[in-house]
Image (cartoon, rainbow, N blue to C red):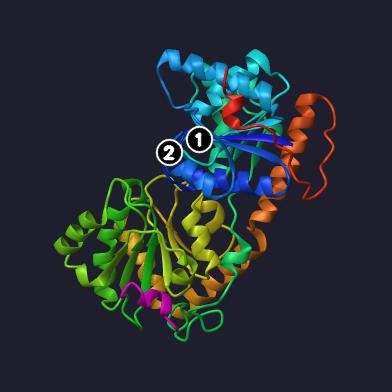
Amino acid sequence: MKIISSIALDGRSAGSWYAIETARRLAARGHQVLFLSRPSGKTIEAAREAGLRVVEGLDLEEKAPAKIYRNLRRVIGLIGEFGPDAVLAHWGEDHTMWGLAKAMRAPKLALIRVRALDPKPPKRHPLSIWLHRRATDMVVTVNTRLYSAYQSRLRIPPEKLQIIEAGIDEAVWAGGQSGRSGPSGPSGLSGHSGRGALEEFGVPAEKPVVVLLARFSPVKGHRVFLSAMTRIRRQHPGAHFLWLGYPSQYDAAMFKRWFVEGNLLESVTVVDRFIPNVHDVLRECTLGVVSSIGSESVSRSLLEYFACGLPAVATDVGGVADLMGRGDFGIMVRPDDPAALAEAVIALLDEPKRAGWRGAAARDYVREHCGWEKRIDAWEELLYRVVSRVRGEDIPRMNAGEPPECEGTVREMLDV
């Protein structure tokens, strides 16, 4: 099957990761996949690093009327040259462009709107209504909140809606058990033995480590967690806090000023760079925190905490409730409530054995039910079903592992 995955972004996020992982794993199954993103930036860099065949020189984020018209012509040309069976539109601008191209020239193209980026409900303006009801053949969301929003706001019928959540790489996250002593550490919580990975960052040994894994952005609730930390230290003065991420609207220097003002400098370690062995680091921590006040359509961090056997305290935003509701894996709290966040972290630190059991249950659940292979199985089933419906005929499935046949360069296809 020929697939175009389109996402007009240049930054990094869990949503762009979802788009890249889905495309990469479909390509590994033998499908011909083109990945279209903004011509420069982190998203297209990550797609290249993942080995995807990328579309060069086409920016669907452009807003000038002349450029929109040019891009529409180039998209129509790409459809004619590549002949995709399906387009996965991960962003609003992509969705609009592909919807127009389908309406004008490609009625048999299966257009699938994928919502793994923006957690806000769909808009009800006339263009959105036309796009979803007339031009779009399937809407895929990553959580039940968005699924319900499409049903209630746009009246999308169940046969045109499906949830396909993000997954974990079983081979990576189920790998070595560094920093662990059985299902939980010696004191009941994971992360109190063999702290080789944490030593690299100067994290004190034999202290409970509360980790926040999130890009440095206001929506991730760093200020909320900062307020919670002062409360946590009153009950657990030995607790240490580890902030992992990369600069966005915030940077490490700004955080340092916060910690000085809050008399927390000695209790926090900030790491603002890529960590190739982040799974080893997480396995040596005590518990994970998702403090977001929005975002979290995918909540990659929560998945990764659970894959490493960490119980979690997480705010009820995006898709967090879906995962937290499948077992006793931690405590969910209201967003933007430092007191509630602090109380939940304190409760887990107060009962280390119970917290350890929760972490072990979370680890077992995600490793059994949340692997990427299961997600790609769902994607393949959906793609064949939707394309067959749009074409009016059953599309034969390809043999597993059948290599794709791609001729010509993507730049040549765009020379219109």
- The picture places residue 303, in percent across and down from the top left corner, at 53, 59
Instruction: Look at the picture and state if 125 lies above or below 201.
Output: above
Q: Residue at x 51, y 52 (%)?
A: 321
The image quadrant of residue 229 is: bottom left
What amino acid is labelled 2 in the image?
A: Asp
Q: Residue at x 46, y 38 (%)?
A: 118
The residue carrying mark 2 is 10
Instruction: Look at the picture and state if 2 lies above or below 349.
Output: above
- Left or right of 413? Residue 62 is left
Residue nearest the viewer, comparing 187 with 403: 403
Label 2: which secondary element: loop
Q: Residue at x 53, y 45 (%)?
A: 48
- The picture places residue 394, in percent across and down from the top left corner, at 85, 32
Residue nearest the viewer, comparing 172 with 133: 172
- The picture places residue 366, in percent across and down from the top left corner, at 60, 62
Instruction: Look at the picture and state if 285 lies above or below 369.
Output: below
Asked if residue 349 can be seen in this view, the reply is yes
Magenta-colored stretch includes residue 47: no
- Left or right of 160? Residue 57 is left
Residue nearest the viewer, comparing 19 with 129: 19
Which callout, 2 or 1, points at the residue further toward the start of the chain?
Answer: 2
Q: Residue at x 56, y 52 (%)?
A: 322
What amino acid is labelled 1 in the image?
A: Ser
Residue 37: which disc?
A: 1
- The picture places residue 358, in percent across and down from the top left corner, at 53, 71
Tell me the magenta residue range: 194-202
